Amino acid sequence: MRGAIDELDRRADLALDHLRGNTTVDRVMYAATELGDFGLLWLLIGTAKGLRSDRDAADAVRIAAVLGMESVLVNGIIKSLFRRERPEWEQERTYKIRKPRSSSFPSGHASSAFVAAALLSQSTPRLRPVWYATAVVVATSRAHVRIHHASDVIGGMATGVVLGRIAKRVWPAPVDGNPFSGRRKKHGR
């Protein structure tokens, strides 16, 4: 199994080499990786959305709280179980970026991106493709800038999908200005 994962990572890195060095792609990927730090991008989106109405403000509270819980779970607990080494740090990079101290698996950026996309899609379903496309860019940026292996990103995406589904069930999007008044589906018998 380890050999297959290493081969996946090697092939993904070679594919990304074709994009590295492209000024536009590098700018987008380095910006995405920086904005993904600590869920900043998603918190900014939630806050901007929250300025529109009480319901959106309540949703911003939900997004921030869920992302906080996701971060504790992924970065504090799950990563400590794996302790995977990151790609070699001393490499040529187009732009300076923060050196992470945590384990490489799973990617916290990818996990938080997919949790946020799930929550934002629940409250603004018409923008679902935008939220998930943005999540893919943030997640992919981590392998592009050589902070994570591709398998770390895939693991983070899967973690985020699962946690996003759980979060939507446990804490649905608010229907009014109360962050705890989420829609509950009624199941008929």
Image (tube, grey):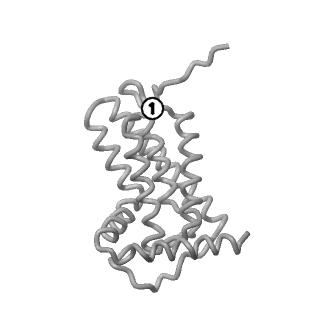
Count the marks: 1
| Residue 79 image position (x, y, % from top left) | 60, 63
Q: Is residue 59 above or below residue 5?
A: above
Q: Which sits in the foreground, 25 or 160? A: 25
Q: Which sits in the foreground, 88 or 27? A: 27
Q: Is residue 53 above or below residue 21?
A: above
Q: Is residue 172 above or below residue 6?
A: above
Q: Is residue 122 left or right of residue 51?
A: right
| Residue 7 image position (x, y, % from top left) | 63, 74
| Residue 106 image position (x, y, % from top left) | 58, 62
Q: Residue at x 31, y 44 (%)?
A: 47
Mark 1 closeness class: few <14, some 14–19, many ≥20 residues within 10 Å: many
Residue type at numbered disc 1: Ala
Task: Examine the image and state in which quarter residue 85 appears.
Answer: bottom right
Residue designated by label 1: 173
Task: Examine the image and state in which quarter residue 62 appears.
Answer: top left
Q: Residue at x 42, y 65 (%)?
A: 141
Determine whether the residue tagged by mark 1 lies in a helix, strand or loop. loop
As drawn, which residue projects farthest toward the left?
52
The quarter of the image holding the N terminus is bottom right
Q: Which sits in the foreground, 19 or 40? A: 19
As drawn, which residue projects farthest toward the right?
1
